[in-house]
């Protein structure tokens, strides 16, 4: 039964809510960690990429099954805070950055949260959506800040906390949380094991962080609209006409968002041929002495997701635009005809993405792309990144959000960020197997968490291997 059939309306008043929140946040709800088994590659096994996607969907389904009440309660808490006029602070893991799917100009992002936490400006009655926070924790307690928390690999709230040795990761947000969303994340942060590599590959904190965030936002905005309040929504989507179809305000919408995301994740298999072509181009680049660059216009997008990420490949490196020019984490971008660039886009015809594509082409690189190809289900008539790259994946998602509400000028809850994340990591799984095949068994380097025992030493080894072999 869907949640909308079981839960019609929860009163927005404070009466009865705080007790429910305390009961929910006090529950220990262990979710079986799918990575506890060690699947081995070999004859008769499903491809690593398919097993990774299955594992992610299994984890997301477990979170929805056991944590939906907490997620819905979090949406009510956020909406109450907005209606009171207090500040909603934000520090929520979306992968290798906190803002990967709420970047500047991102379509469908409701202007609800202030990124970070400023003790000088926080006050009683504020809310903090936080699962990665180094402090000051005493300020949260002193001001009775309403904290919505969740485990992340870079904290002692995650399973396997005994492995953490890095001081900045020896923190917890759970003791301060009034609502706790248990996700089953571990300090390893990745879920696929391959023989010959101690570090698991295939991170999942990004997709989990994005999906839980958008599930909360779907109902936060529904509640606000029901109460006659709206907030600005980012992006370049044309303003909705007053008579345009609107989402129902009478029942939770997080199930609708979740169901649509799961359908689109299933459709990644539809483009597996293109994904394998990207993996093949990556292997070509590496084995010819070139590099695999992963681009996003903003650093906190695909660029940083591909850069020394726990559970990520040593052979990918980030490139992004800063002050009007392309830069890497080591300096200015200088590509070569041996290189591959994988472009992560969140709209098909962004002018800056097209300008940067021209720079990649001028350098002679091969270029692949991941991202939506439509705006409101229609492809652009003019130029678009996906039309001009060598291979593209991401045709199952749209540029704009899913839900329109009375009083909101644009739709909220896009899915393209989640899909970009998962297509990228599916591609990385294919790169692993392609490299093993091409090299007769050499396993490409995978980064460990730097926060756990042996993590820094392992990272140094992977970086040295990258310098020596390119992978």
Image (cartoon, helix red, strand yellow):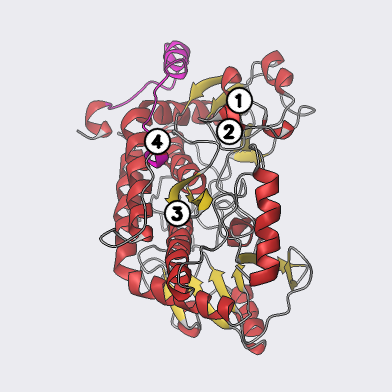
Sequence-wise first label, 2 or 4: 4
Q: Is residue 20 above or below residue 105?
A: above
- Placement of 251 over or under 108, stated as above or below: above
Q: Cα distance, mark 2 to mark 3?
A: 32 Å
In front of the other: 359 or 118: 359
Q: Residue under label 4, please give it.
A: 33
Q: Do callouts 2 and 4 mark residues in contact (Cβ within 8 Å)?
A: no
Circle 1/circle 2 CB separation < 8 Å: yes
Nearest to viewer (mark 1 / mark 4) = 4
Return the residue at label 2: 131
Which sits earlier in the primary sequence, circle 3 or circle 1?
Answer: 1
Q: What residue lies at 44% left-to-right and 33% top-to-bottom?
A: 184
Describe the element under mark 4 as helix, strand or loop: loop
Are there few (<14), some (14-19), or many (20+) residues within 10 Å of tag 2?
many
In this picture, which residue range is highlighted in magenta? 7-35
Q: Is residue 29 magenta?
A: yes
Taking 147 as reference, is 467 left or right? right
Residue at 69 percent across and 38 percent down: it is 116
In the picture, residue 467 is in which quadrant?
A: bottom right
Which secondary structure type mostly characterizes the magenta part of the structure? loop
Q: Residues within 10 Å of mark 1 (few under 14, many from 20)?
A: many
């Amino acid at each position: 039964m869907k949640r909308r059939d079981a839960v019609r309306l929860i009163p927005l008043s404070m009466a009865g809510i705080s007790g429910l929140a305390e009961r929910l946040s006090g529950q220990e709800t262990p979710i079986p960690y799918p990575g506890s088994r060690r699947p081995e590659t070999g004859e008769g096994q499903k491809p690593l990429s398919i097993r990774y996607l299955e594992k992610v969907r299994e984890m997301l389904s477990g979170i929805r099954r056991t944590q939906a009440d907490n997620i819905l309660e979090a949406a009510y808490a956020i909406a109450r805070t907005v209606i009171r006029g207090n500040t909603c602070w934000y520090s929520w893991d979306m992968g290798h950055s906190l803002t990967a799917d709420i970047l500047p100009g991102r379509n469908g992002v409701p202007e609800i949260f202030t990124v970070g936490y400023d003790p000088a400006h926080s006050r009683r009655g504020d809310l903090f959506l936080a699962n990665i926070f180094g402090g000051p924790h005493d300020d949260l307690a002193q001001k009775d800040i309403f904290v919505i928390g969740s485990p992340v690999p870079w904290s002692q709230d995650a399973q396997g906390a005994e492995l953490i040795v890095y001081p900045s990761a020896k923190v917890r947000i759970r003791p301060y949380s009034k609502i706790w969303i248990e996700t089953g994340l571990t300090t390893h942060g990745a879920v696929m094991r391959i023989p010959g590599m101690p570090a698991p590959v295939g991170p999942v904190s990004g997709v989990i962080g994005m999906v839980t965030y958008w599930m909360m936002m779907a109902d936060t905005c529904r509640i606000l609209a029901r109460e006659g309040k709206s907030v600005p929504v980012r992006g370049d989507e044309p303003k909705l006409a007053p008579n345009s179809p609107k989402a129902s305000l009478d029942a939770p919408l997080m199930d609708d968002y979740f169901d649509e995301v799961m359908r689109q994740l299933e459709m990644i298999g539809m483009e597996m041929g293109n994904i394998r072509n990207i993996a093949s181009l990556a292997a070509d680049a590496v084995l010819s002495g070139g590099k695999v660059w992963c681009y996003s216009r903003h650093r906190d997008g695909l660029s940083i997701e591909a850069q020394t990420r726990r559970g990520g490949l040593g052979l990918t490196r980030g490139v992004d635009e800063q002050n009007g020019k392309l830069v890497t984490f080591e300096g200015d971008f200088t590509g070569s005809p041996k290189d591959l660039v994988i472009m992560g886009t969140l709209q098909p015809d962004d002018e800056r993405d097209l300008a940067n594509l021209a720079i990649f082409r001028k350098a002679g690189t091969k270029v692949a792309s991941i991202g939506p190809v439509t705006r409101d289900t229609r492809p652009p008539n003019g130029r678009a990144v996906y039309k001009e790259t060598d291979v593209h994946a991401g045709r199952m998602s749209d540029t704009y959000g899913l839900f329109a509400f009375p009083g909101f000028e644009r739709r909220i809850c896009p899915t393209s960020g989640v899909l970009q994340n998962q297509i990228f990591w599916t591609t990385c799984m294919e790169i692993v197997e392609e490299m093993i095949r091409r090299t007769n068994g050499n396993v490409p380097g995978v980064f460990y968490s730097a926060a756990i025992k042996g993590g820094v030493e392992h990272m140094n080894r992977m970086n040295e291997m990258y310098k020596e072999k390119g992978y």
